[in-house]
Image: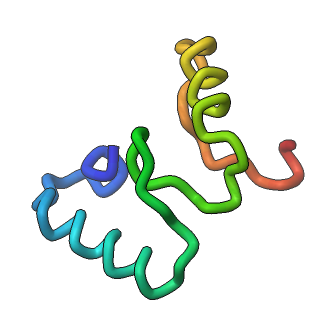
Amino acid sequence: MASDLLKQEIDFKEFSDVLTSASDYYQQMAYSLYGLVDKRVYNVKKTFEEIEKRPSIGYYPFTKEQL
């Protein structure tokens, strides 16, 4: 997904290292069975179950006005 947004190939190890470093520094992300998730997500399993129920809805960074 990141390579699609950047429109170029990325080095997965370097990308993972950056995410891990940022996660350690800012302490806002945590590893789970689903990968890195924001610590403010209360029920990660339920969130991913809801996402899987709606495969036709792609990821999109909505603005507050759109919500």
Q: Nearer the viewer, residue 57 or 21?
A: 21
Position above or below: 9 against 67: below
Looking at the image, residue 31 lies above or below residue 53: below
**13 to the left or right of 57:** left
Q: In which quarter of the image is residue 15?
A: bottom left
Nearer the observer, 67 or 39: 39
Image point (53%, 14%), residue name? 55
Vertical placement of residue 48 versus 19, above or below: above
Q: Is residue 65 left or right of residue 15?
A: right
Q: Where is residue 22 in the image (x, y as percent from the top left)?
A: 40, 79
x, y percentage for residue 64? Answer: 84, 55
Q: Is residue 66 left or right of residue 14?
A: right
Q: Relative to 49, is 43 on the left or the right?
A: right
| Quadrant housing residue 11 | bottom left
Front position in the image: 1 or 12: 12
- Which residue is painted at 63% across and 49% down in the image? 61
Q: Residue 4 appears at what percent x and percent y?
A: 30, 44
Instruction: Pick the quarter of the image with the C terminus.
Output: top right
Q: How many marks?
A: 0
Q: In which quarter of the image is residue 31?
A: bottom left
Q: Which residue is drawn at 42% across and 39% down?
A: 34
Rendered-image quadrant of the N terminus = top left
Q: Where is residue 16 in the image (x, y as percent from the top left)?
A: 23, 64
- Residue at 84 percent of width and 44 percent of height: 66
| Nearest the eye: 59 or 42 | 42
